């Protein structure tokens, strides 16, 4: 499996996932909450930020069923559902669905963030339908 690179900007994010928390950056100048971690606010271009713990609540924005792996290390996972969801805090996050929901997915469906420990040093967010 290909592991994501950890940068100075994303270290707290990856550490949070390992600890079972989804951490988001909040701009200390304008209050914009952002995801993915990056050094500068897209809204006001400030470099100031703090980390906040996300609630873990989200709503389905879009999804796709993946039947072909985009990289050989993902071949054994197919087929899987990849969901883009709007977090309660505002930003969108893309992650796999933990398991098929009891009913069909639909726009606005409630989801909860869970954590998938892939290895001793990598935990990834996943969605579970509620």
Image (tube, rainbow, N blue to C red):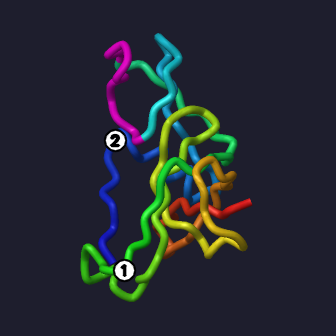
Outermost residue, bottom side: 76
Q: Quadrant of the C terminus?
A: bottom right
Q: Nearer the viewer, mark 1 or mark 2?
A: 1
User: Looking at the picture, how far across and down is residue 5, in whole percent?
Assistant: 30, 57
Q: Main secondary structure of the magenta part?
A: loop
Q: Residue at x 58, y 51 (%)?
A: 107
- The number of numbered badges drawn on the structure is 2
Find disc 2 in the rendering and name its residue: 8
Q: Quadrant of residue 46?
A: top left
Q: Residues within 10 Å of mark 2 (few under 14, many from 20)?
A: few
**Disc number for residue 67:** 1
Q: Which residues are magenta?
A: 36-46
The numbered mark, 1 or 2, whose residue comes first in the sequence reads 2
130 displayed left or right of 86: right
69 displayed left or right of 62: left
Q: Quadrant of the N terminus?
A: bottom left
User: Looking at the picture, how far across and down is residue 103, in whole percent?
Assistant: 69, 70
């Amino acid at each position: 499996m290909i592991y994501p690179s950890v940068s100075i900007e994303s270290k707290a994010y990856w550490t949070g996932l390992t600890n079972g928390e989804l951490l988001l950056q909040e701009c200390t100048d304008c209050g914009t909450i952002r995801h993915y971690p990056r050094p500068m606010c897209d809204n006001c271009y400030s470099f100031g930020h703090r980390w906040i713990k996300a609630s873990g609540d989200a709503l389905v924005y879009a999804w796709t069923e993946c039947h072909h792996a985009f990289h050989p290390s993902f071949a054994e996972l197919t087929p899987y559902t990849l969901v883009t969801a709007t977090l309660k805090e505002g930003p969108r996050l893309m992650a796999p669905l933990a398991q098929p929901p009891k009913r069909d997915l639909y726009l606005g469906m409630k989801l909860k963030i869970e954590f998938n420990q892939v290895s001793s040093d990598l935990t990834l967010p996943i969605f579970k339908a509620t």
